[in-house]
Image (cartoon, rainbow, N blue to C red):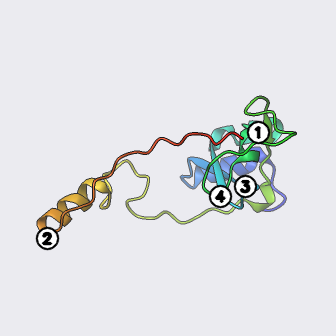
Amino acid sequence: MAGVGARELADTLAGSGVRGVALTWVDNAGITRVKAVPVDRLEAATSSGVGMSPVFDVYGSDDSMTIGAFTGGPVGDLRLFPDLDRVTQLQPIPRWARGRPSTVGPKRASRTAAASGHSPAPCRPRRRRPRWR
């Protein structure tokens, strides 16, 4: 879709049934991050960018936060600008993000484990505390 303007690209994608565009980037820890933009906002995202907190600059590979001499914390704004020449329309994956129940998930896994006589390990959310030094 190289060489196409944002409005034309958005119209083409919308005509194909696409509802959103994923803006991806790799942070300093090597983790791929994503922000989604509705296809009808692609033109605005191209001209103004999409906001991202500069706090992503200090995330480690385990999503813990670090601190540095030049890090100001989550204050401020970084802008992501989509590269329209790299837009790739992906084929839909059945039963993924379609508003229908998934065939996998923690409840089903627990029921399956219980039905087979296994005792699933309890899952409790962990609170992560920032490690400030």
Task: Tell me, yes or no, whether the two marked residues, 2 and 3, touch with CB atoms within 8 Å.
Answer: no
Which residue in the protein does label 1 denote?
Answer: 54
Q: Is residue 26 above or below residue 127?
A: below
Tell me which corner region of the image, top left, top right, bottom left or bottom right, holds residue 74.
Answer: top right
Residue farthest along the front direction in this orientation: 133
Please state which amino acid type lies under the numbered disc 3.
Trp
Image coords of residue 117 (percent x, y): 12, 69
Task: Tell me, yes or no, whether the two marked residues, 3 and 4, touch with CB atoms within 8 Å.
Answer: no
Which residue in the protein does label 2 denote?
Answer: 116
Quadrant for the C terminus in the image: top right
Q: Nearer the viewer, residue 13 or 101?
A: 101
Task: Label 1, secondary structure: give it.
Answer: helix
Image coords of residue 24 (percent x, y): 69, 54
Task: Label 2, secondary structure: give it.
Answer: loop
Residue at left 72%, top 51%? 9
Mark closest to the chain's N terminus, 2 or 3: 3
Task: Tell me, yes or no, whether the two marked residues, 1 and 3, touch with CB atoms within 8 Å.
Answer: no
Mark 1 or 3: the one toward you: 1
Residue farthest along the right direction in this orientation: 70
Residue at left 42%, top 58%? 96
Label 2: few (<14), some (14–19) or many (≥20) C-alpha neighbours in 10 Å: few
Task: Label 3, secondary structure: give it.
Answer: strand
> Disc 1 to disc 3, how far (Cα)?
13 Å
Please state which amino acid type lies under the numbered disc 4.
Ser
Which residue in the protein does label 4 denote?
Answer: 61
Which residue in the protein does label 3 denote?
Answer: 25
Task: Tell me, yes or no, whether the two marked residues, 4 and 2, touch with CB atoms within 8 Å.
Answer: no
Tell me which corner region of the image, top left, top right, bottom left or bottom right, holds residue 88.
Answer: bottom right
Mark closest to the chain's N terminus, 1 or 4: 1
Please state which amino acid type lies under the numbered disc 1.
Pro
> Disc 4 to disc 2, how far (Cα)?
36 Å
